[in-house]
Image (tube, rainbow, N blue to C red):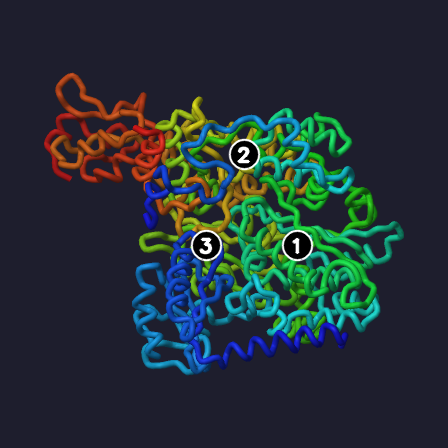
Amino acid sequence: MRRLAAQHLQPEAPILVRDFTIRGQPMHREPTTQELRELVADFRPGRGHVLPALHRVQEAFGYVSPRAMEVIARQLNTTAALIYGAASFYTDIRTAPPPETEISWCSGPTCRLRGGDRIREAMQQVLELPLGGHSPDHRYGLHVGQCNGTCHEAPIVWVNGVVTGPLTVADAIRLAREVKGE
Amino acid sequence: MNATLQQLIADAERRWDDRRHDGKVHVTVVMDTSSIARGARETLEAFQRAAEVAPDNLAVHITGSWGFCWLEPCVLVRSAAGTRTVMYHDITEDRVADLLTRVLQNRDWPEMALGVVEGNATEEIPLLEDLPFMQGQVRRLMARTGIIDPENIDDYLALGGYQGLARALEMPDEAIIKEMLDSGVGGRGGANFPVGRKWDFLRTATAEPKYLVCNADEGDPGAWVNRTLLEGDPHLIIEGLLIAARATGAREAYVYIRYEYPLAIARMEKAVEQAKERGLLGENILGMGWDFDVIVFKGAGSYVCGDETGLINSIDGYRGMPRIKPPFPAQAGLWNKPTNVNNVESYANAPLILREGAAWWCNVNPGDQPEKGTKMFCLSGQIKNAGIVFEIPFGSGTMRSVLERYGGGMLPGCEVKGFQPGGPLSGVLPASDLDLPLQLAPYRERGMFLGGGGIVYFDTRTSIVDLVLWMTGFCEDESCGRCTTCHGGTQRGVETLPRIALGGGRESDIEKLEDLVKTLVWSNCQHGQLSPTAIKLMLRGFRDEIDSLIRDKVDPTRSLPGFIAYRVRSQSDPALPEAVEICPTHAIVMDGHDQWMVDDRLCILCGACKEVAPGAIAVVDRFQPATIPTAAAAAGGGA
């Protein structure tokens, strides 16, 4: 295992990819309507701005709340149903706050050939989560990641966006236990 | 040539040349997603700290990938004299100081050197182009990746960039399309439909405005050739789009990049910004009164958005569900206006064709071959050089030759069992088909296709049922849900295949799978139509294994969950307590006689116990009870 995941789990380590939250801070609050309106004020109807608006809200607040969908709908002169339809279609648009530590499990072929599925099985058992689930207190979650070509490190998971691998099943179990705080 | 562009190029060339003669050692760190995963960011920061201390002796740059992902972080070092460049591999942070000590004294570090990029080979360091995995490569699309800084437009301009555009500016639109048609360049997403014809559809469309879309939603697991280009040479794609805009009259282009490529998105956005600053994009391009804009569009994790109409719906703001054709995008695409969708590689070829001419572009291929130009491929799976990206004349080489030459062969102890030529929709073939060339026809004849370039080799320890279950599961997961054949059919697939994997396969399951293959082809889009390809090819190429699983209940790979069980082999093995501890379900328990045993009701077959205590745990065949050691025999201990 080239990189110790532990170094990214320490409280002082900033989250590298998702910079919208700092560990130790209060959990995501729901943004107010006014904040949301200001955030999406420059988007216009009929210009392909649905996904960009969803991305911008998610980058700012970590997820797209029902209220955010209504605000986006109003800004883009459409219905909240259409926005929800689009948001719920994509795996990377969240409709609930993200967990503090997120393990994304790579579902790619090389990881699979090198034992990735057994890693998933074991981590799900330790974390007691389905794929796509998170703990009730939002401390940790398990997400499906898609292959992006770091197969020389296979099998991998991303811990808050950082590639961690190659993992043995035992490594993955230890990692999951650490994340869970066992 | 356009005077403004000529000036831009001349300035960039001068700056590039000045850098060569500034008397500094130039260190260039490969920074792409693969190298960052292996610590390139830390390496880069270490070099940058050193450069701050000695700014007169050392300059640090970044570049894109050479395709040597398993050797990252790679670093190129150019001597102070500017005449010799050596590439080093595996330069992690802790090796930076060692490397710097040597190169600042004008010495090589042969142990870590990969090859000489520029200058003469030495006894210890060969030329990079003489390395086995560089031979036979014709790097045209990748000519600049690994050399230029992808975040600096000047580097691109200095090395022949925007010269294809310069020529296109002097040609009428029909002549550009004729050049594209003459080259014979086909769509690189897998269909190989002539790009020139596609552009002509858009050119002759009457409605306005017209749109271009660059499909960088490279969703095939095990393919990252587009990522290599987007991260290594983003301006090549922008130039391709500019040429396409000249040829077709399009006013706007969308580059749709998948969300999983954050670095590619960032570099593309930066490239667009820089092109706008230099007047190569936006309003009044190069003072010619021509307006054209490129918009970088972030996907959000959906495989069917790689289908051209799914992608259009996604940009339009709907669910990314493929549309029913006709009308084709050339008549009604984005906002129901004429739209042309091409793959990244298709657009990236346009600058080469325009700069050097169609004849040069296809001079690497035999004349009678339908595949033209060069094509990038990447290899993964159970191979030594997992992750390699290479570019060869399209149509040259066989599956076996690229595995040996570029993939470095299978991992030690692995024997090739078969391969997947390009994505989960492309199917699987057994090792007996390894001599098939990398051309389109042989795969079409077998009811499959070559795909976008991500080849995966699997070994004899891999169960074909498990692999095809993975592909079918992927297709089910990514089905948009429009057609019952697709969303229902793939569900039947992920019910039937696990039954076989769990040892409960029935003779009738084969018929059921065959029915599935016949039914799914009636889906609307390619995703549904092609999702049973893997099942079809599995039944054809790996029938013995399926029969053995269903009829004889024997799994030759000894890996499927229904066919194996874990047993405690040695009670006295010192590692056994560790195995007990690591088990995620606490399935290793004491029986009534103070003996450790594996409780099958709890065991999830993850194999962690066997990893930590190979001597204490054994894998046995569930259908052959005789092979299961009794508690008494196991108590005897030993390996």
Distance from the alpha carbon under mark 3 to that under mark 1: 22 Å
Please give the label number shown on residue A62.
2
Query: What residue is drawn where x is 28% and y is 30%?
Result: B583
Cβ atoms under marks 3 and 1 closer than 8 Å: no
Q: Secondary structure at mark 3?
A: helix
Please state which of residues B190 and B40 is positioned toward the viewer in this rendering: B40
Image vertical order of residue B300 relative to residue B55, above or below = above
Give coordinates of residue B141: x percent, y percent.
59, 66
Query: What residue is drawn where x is 78% and y is 45%?
Result: B333
Which callout, 2 or 3, points to the residue nearer the camera? 2
In the rendered structure, the answer to whether residue B229 lies left or right of residue B119 reads right
Q: Chain of mark 3?
A: B
Residue found at the very far right of the displayed protein: B206
- Residue located beneath label 1 in the image: B343
- Residue located beneath label 3 in the image: B34
Residue B400 seen in the figure:
no
- Neighbour class for label 3 at 10 Å: few (<14), some, many (≥20)? many
